Image: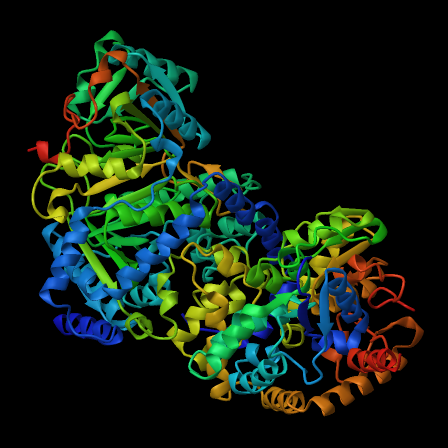
Amino acid sequence: MSGARAEILSAVRQALGRGRLDPAAEAALRVRVAAHRRNLVPARATALDRAGRIDLFVAMAEGVQATVTRVASPAAVPAAVVQYLAAENLPADLVMAPDPGLDAIPWHSRPLLQLRRGPAEPADAVSLTPCFAAVAETGTLMLVSGADTPTTLNFLPDTHIAVVRADQVVATYEEGWDRLRAAVPGEAAGARLPRTVNFITGPSRTGDIEQRIVLGAHGPRRLHIVVIDDPASDGRGQGQDGEDGCEGPAAAG
Amino acid sequence: MAGKRLRVALFVTCLVDLFRPTIGFAAVKLLELAGCAVEVPRLQTCCGQPAYNSGDNADARTIARRVIDAFAGYDYVVAPSGSCAGMLRRHYPALFADDPIMLPRAQELAARSWELVSFLVDVCGLDRVAAEWRGAATYHDACSGLRELGIKDQPRRLLGSVAGLKLRELPGAEVCCGFGGTFCVKYPQISDKMVDDKATDIAATGAAAVLAGDLGCLLNIAGKLTRRGQPIEVRHVAEVLAGMTGEVAPIGMPR
Amino acid sequence: MHATSRDFSANAGAALADRNLQRALAMMTGSGFPLRRREVVERLPEFEALRDIGQSIKEHTLAHLDFYLELYEEQVAASGGIVHWTRTAEEACAAVLEICRAAGASIVTKGKSMIAEEIGLNGFLESHGITPIETDLGEYIIQLRHEPPSHLIAPAMHLVKEQVADTFRAAHRTLDPQRPLAEPRQLCDEARAELRPRFLAAEIGITGANFLVAESGSSIIVTNEGNGDLTQTLPRVHIVVASLEKLVPTFEDAATLLRLLARSATGQEFSSYTTVSTGPRRPGDLDGPEAYHVVLVDNGRSAMLGGEFHDMLRCIRCGACMNHCPVYAAVGGHAYGWVYPGPMGAVLTPGLIGLEAAAPLPEASTLCGRCESVCPVKIPLPNLLRRWREREYARRLTKRSWRAGLSLWAWVAARPALYHGLSELGSRALGWAGGRRGRFRSLPFAGGWTRMRDLPAPEGRSFHSLWAERQKRGARR
């Protein structure tokens, strides 16, 4: 196939009316890429303060049929989860990401809640995951794959519960990428990034039949987001990811 | 208007010349009302659009050269048609993109070329007319005028000043009526579906009349409405604005 | 895929008479994509500015495509993936087959991919004993029906729910024949249940890519169902098939284009799942594929680059153009006869399968420009259609009678006295013949018009004659 590679590149250059770019020009383009310059970013979320961003995130997420519960501390999460499962008439039986941040939540306060840690299996009905970030501009969760965060938890079960800390709420996708790049130090971007970065905006849906929206096509029918808006965590957040062990994949083994 | 009167050359258009001269006279009346001195260059014929849209650029250029010659020297060239004005304004420069002699002349003409209603409002500053027309009317946005020349508010503004006229917005006002010059005879079935949908939308407004700024669209729409047996008046917006609706029957209707 | 674009006229006629299709199309134009797009665009004041930026991102990338392709490949390799460069549809299909064979795998699930459609991947794999299972609901439905997609985003949008129910009853024979299948909810649930075991059994997952990100060698898929994600996460091999022009430089550039894409395509702020994949699973990962392959496809892109149709390479496959096209709304996607329908299909198809095979497509437009006005990257579609028409005219693909008519028209239009004389004659004759009725129900040589609508009669005198008379009267005073 190296013949094809050379031929395609040659055809591209010929079409552009030039040969290979000279080293200076290539270097300039590499600098351009590395600069990660932002294009115009919509003002929708950027002018908001922390509280405004969280409110926007919640409003946008609810606008796409995610449901949201806000709690004031990690200690309140188990009760919120139990309450949600009861309200949806779901068994109190979850598969959970083996994430240190989630482990730090006092699940023992709800001993009837059955938790298994690991990737999802076909029979799992409900999953629980942390997030890497939550993007306010469109109510979008940003999740990354890793040793503690298997991707199947986001897609196989019918119900996905995602736990978001207030300090993970960012205004825009660009801020999410800044945080991810900062969390995965190293050289080549391709080598540093996780296998999967999921941007999830509401539950699974399709409009393929008569343009009528139906939730729960192949992914989860329900997306429930628990936002821990802990006033005590106000000072944390910006550039201090890794506090609760919700680090990027580089921290894993 | 203070100062020297604008010397405006009327670009009649083929369809107005053949089918409905009243539109041309209405245009002249409106332009004179707005303070312009109007002339009609004798050597004008067609803008060349049928050839251009068929990919026959050679013939389009032949015709365009004559238009550029015929309309030299006037302050403005005004056509009661968005598609013809669009041809002069947007496409003549493209036609002569590779011709270093004709290109500047084409660009110069393009800069002086306008569709009638937008000229009255945007250049002459006209914001009202003295005409009267009692009843409900709806307005179809012809495609070239809308998308090539940005004509949207101007006719509505002037129609809003016509005494007794109640303007109802047409759902799908911006959807093509299916005329498309040669399209309506090359793909008659598709064109028919499009004009049929347009007629249905027009009838649903309950308006007594439908107006537009392009005679091609109007002939198409009128022909469909009468074939459907729906007695909705079809007129060029200039006829209403100039108060000349008493001088000629609506398009396609008996005298 | 065998093209029937040459038969567009006949296809269109059949489409206009197809009541199910007409019902389905009315759903799109009524309350579907165009309305939703308008609403979501109103909620983003920066949308117009983003269109300009999207255009310039694509332009910059294309102008440096060789650099970005090499950077992209370098990063894919750094992530543990492999890029396969393929010049043609045949090479691309062969590359996919080779990957399957090398992996010793034959159970394949597939996310929606137009490039895979373009290269005829499914048919090729089937002829070699591998049947890829389409997992996108619309693609699954049309795979069962042995039909091609009729829309870029909603492949089964030409169907009404009754047709889908009939297809499912015929295909899912183990289920209770009395079960209710009247509503999309029931149909979706049935497809979900049918496909879940297939996802779990798959050894290879094939997806397309909405974008390829050069900075990190990543691919991005934009979906709503989650099928693309299950396709690319569960099997042990993930194959991405993507054409050259999908490259963008950075995630910041991708973010801009993503803001345009969902809004333009379905009227959503963002799709349910926008997924970035970079290489295979990492050491320590609990799931994910072991191998990541990218089949990079040229298939005519480098030939379009830098040429008359270069602008078409900006296309991000959102479908906005066809959602807003009155011709598409009248005849649907199958009439266009190949993979890509609507305005973008009319421009792209002749470039990919040749003008002779696709000749009617550039003609089947009123050049109304609505497509261009909604294109998120500002492709000048009407101008590109006109360029194809120029080529058709120059290659005499246009009907002889038409060319003769145009030449005659130009000849007369160059002779004002003759032109005006004929116009006066014509208006008098037709004005008189139209009589008191003011219109013609039929007219010799005008059957194309009068079959469907009346032809209004002229007033009876030409403008130029009347104007000349008026001038004379004025001069006499």
Q: Quadrant of residue C127?
A: bottom left
The image shows residue B86 at horizontal and vertical percentages of: 58, 68
Specify the quadrant that holds the N terminus of chain B. Answer: bottom right
Let me know if residue A69 appears in the view: yes
Q: Nearer the viewer, residue A234 or B83?
A: B83
In the image: residue C270, left or right of residue C425? left
Residue drawn where x is 59% and y is 55% of the image: C25
Q: Residue at x 71, y 78 (%)?
A: B14
Residue C137 in the image, given as x and y percentages of width and height: 43, 48
Residue A240, image quadrant = top left
Q: Relative to the observer, which residue lies in front, C150 or C377?
A: C377
- In the rendered structure, the answer to whether residue A184 lies left or right of residue A217 reads left
Residue C379 placement (x, y as % from top left): 43, 62
Residue A78, placed above or below residue C390: above
In x, y percent, where is residue A173? Answer: 30, 38
Query: The C terminus of chain B is located in which quarter?
Result: bottom right
Residue farthest along the front direction in this orientation: B3
Note whether residue C187 is visible. Answer: no
The residue at the point 34 percent across, 32 percent down is: A46
Q: Which of the 4 quarters of the picture holds residue C399?
A: bottom right
Asked if C259 appears above or below A100 in the picture, the reply is below
Q: How many marks?
A: 0
